[in-house]
Image: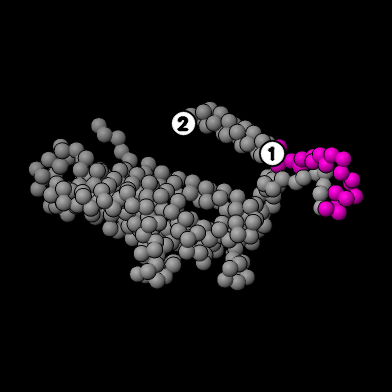
Amino acid sequence: MSQSLRLRAGIVSILLLLAFVGAWWGATLPTQVDLGDMDPEYAAMMGLDTVQESDIPTPGDIGSAIWTHLSDPFYVSGSNDMGIGIQLAHSLWRVLAGFALAALVAVPLGFLIGMSPLMHKALAPYIQILKPISPLAWMPLALYIIQDASISSIFVIFICSIWPMMVNTAYGVASVRDDWLAVAKTLEVGPIKKAFQVILPAAAPTILTGMRISMGIAWLVIVAAEMLVGGTGIGYFIWNEWNNLDLANVIFAILLIGVVGMILDMIFGLLGKAVSYKEV
């Protein structure tokens, strides 16, 4: 991307943001209420006012919430009152733990499926049955068997992360060019050495794409899982603030989820670029 295009794209993005914030600010301005012929003193006694504030938080309210939470993100004032940094750390820990466990299972299985037509045929029915099941559908069963909300959340992340990684790994392994495999066979390269020195580098971009998709899904699912099980995490924070009817904090948490998700996606995007190659 050229420097000129980057600059123009940045300007357009800023203008769109300003337009959105401006429209938001305009929509949340106080409105005049026509009380008709009602006596002003009676209206005041009944709690009525000629100026009605918006129920939707203003951009200023969101800015205040951002400042409040980010100025002290790691405080602990009880089991149900923790800083946003601690809540976010709980969510990230669950996502990374479940994702890592999924990678340990999905990548080797993907290699096996991609390299063996027999295993591909044998495992395909199970993958096609299990893959469409919503990860949250596993939560009641996980809670019953594991009887721990945090570990159950990690299990749900494991379930939702495993399929994109496994499928992409199998596809990447099966798509390695035949002439590269023929060269390895000609040089009498062993199966383990061929897997690590020929197949893995060739399939790495596709594997990273699967991991990128899995991480995006995992970050989506953890919020819903934490809303169900409660306790800690960014999902629990949103649900708790909704119960407190504090929409400014809810919107702040939604923005934070988006920013963290973008950062995670960018990390895997950079890793994908680092292992990508051009075929000649």
Total numbered labels: 2
Above or below, comparing residue 58 to residue 74 in the picture: above
* On-image quarter of the C terminus: top left
In the displayed structure image, the side of residue 54 where residue 253 appears, left or right: left
Give yes or no for residue 183 being in the magenta stretch.
no
Viewer-side residue, 164 vs 125: 125
The alpha-carbon separation of the residues under discs 2 and 1 comes to: 37 Å
> Is residue 194 in view?
no
Horizontally, residue 32 falls left or right of residue 42, namely left
Residue 243: name its quadrant. bottom right
Magenta stretch: give its range: 26-46
Tag nearer the camera, 2 or 1: 1
Question: At which x and y percent is residue 10?
Answer: 56, 34
Q: Amino acid at mark 1?
A: Ala
Tell me the number on the disc at residue 238: none
Residue 27 in the image: above or below residue 245: above
Residue wearing tag 1: 27
Tag on residue 1? Answer: 2
Q: Is residue 129 left or right of residue 219?
A: left
Q: Residues within 10 Å of mark 2 (few under 14, many from 20)?
A: few
Residue type highlighted by circle 2 = Met
What residue is at 89 percent from the left and 45 percent from the top? 39
Secondary element under disc 2, as helix, strand or loop, is loop
The residue sitting at 51% across, 28% down in the picture is 5
Q: Is residue 93 visible?
A: yes
Residue 17 versus residue 108 in the image, above or below: above
